Amino acid sequence: MRIIALLLLASCAAPIIPATPQEPPKPTLQDLLATPKEQWPTVGWVPEYDFAVSETLKLAPITKFPCSNTFQAIAKAESSFKRESMYMEPAPLFKYSIGLLQLSLSDQKNYRLDCGWVTEDDLKHPIKNLYCGVQILSALEKKYPTLNFYQYGGKYWSVLRKAEFWPGKSQSGYERFKKECK
């Protein structure tokens, strides 16, 4: 009798299955935008930047690209991946270009965007900088649909001014961009 009872109990017991570890949820673009800039590296390119660019492209599409890592190449040529980088633009602009893509505080007004910027320090947040930079390039493509990438992109970033479309302009920035563009 005892043996039968033990066998019955043993057959009723659920097998012990070890729990499989759950992957933490992947952050959203909004999570990355809300992450304080101090938590991002001061120099370099991290996978979250690529994710932010791809998510922003869903909101502000761009159809013409010279390479798969276009924004990484622009950031390398413009700021050497330094999120704190600042450059005072010469006359007639006389304003700072700031962050990975060297954007200016006036850009969100000029392009009618909501980048979440209040101060120039906000432009040093790498995700916000990329988020707005993608939207600027998208706005330029929409505004100039008959132009190629270098013609409309060069209207904002000097590193995109290819000689055949921008005669007489310095090519040092373009050469830095082209070297990184893969």
Image: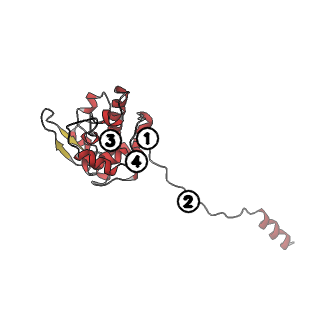
Q: Quadrant of residue 158?
A: top left
- Dot placed on the residue nearer the N-terminal end, 4 or 1: 4
Q: Position of residue 39 (x, y in %)?
A: 32, 52
Task: Categorize mark 4 by other alpha carbons within 10 Å: few (<14), some (14-19), many (20+).
Answer: some
**Residue drawn at (71%, 64%) of the image:** 15
Q: Quick one: SS at disc 4? A: helix
Q: Which residue is labeled 2 in the image?
A: 21
In the rendered structure, the answer to whether residue 171 lies left or right of residue 72 reads left
**Gap between marks 1 and 2 measured at Cα:** 27 Å
Would you say residue 88 is visible in this rendering? yes
Q: Quadrant of residue 170?
A: top left
- Dot placed on the residue nearer the N-terminal end, 1 or 2: 2
Q: Which residue is labeled 4 in the image?
A: 50
Tell me the kind of residue under disc 1.
Glu
Q: Quick one: SS at disc 1? A: helix
Q: Which residue is labeled 3 in the image?
A: 128
Q: Quick one: SS at disc 2? A: loop
Task: Categorize mark 1 by other alpha carbons within 10 Å: few (<14), some (14-19), many (20+).
Answer: some
Q: Considering only vertical position in the picture, is 181 above or below 168?
A: below
Residue 55's disc number: 1
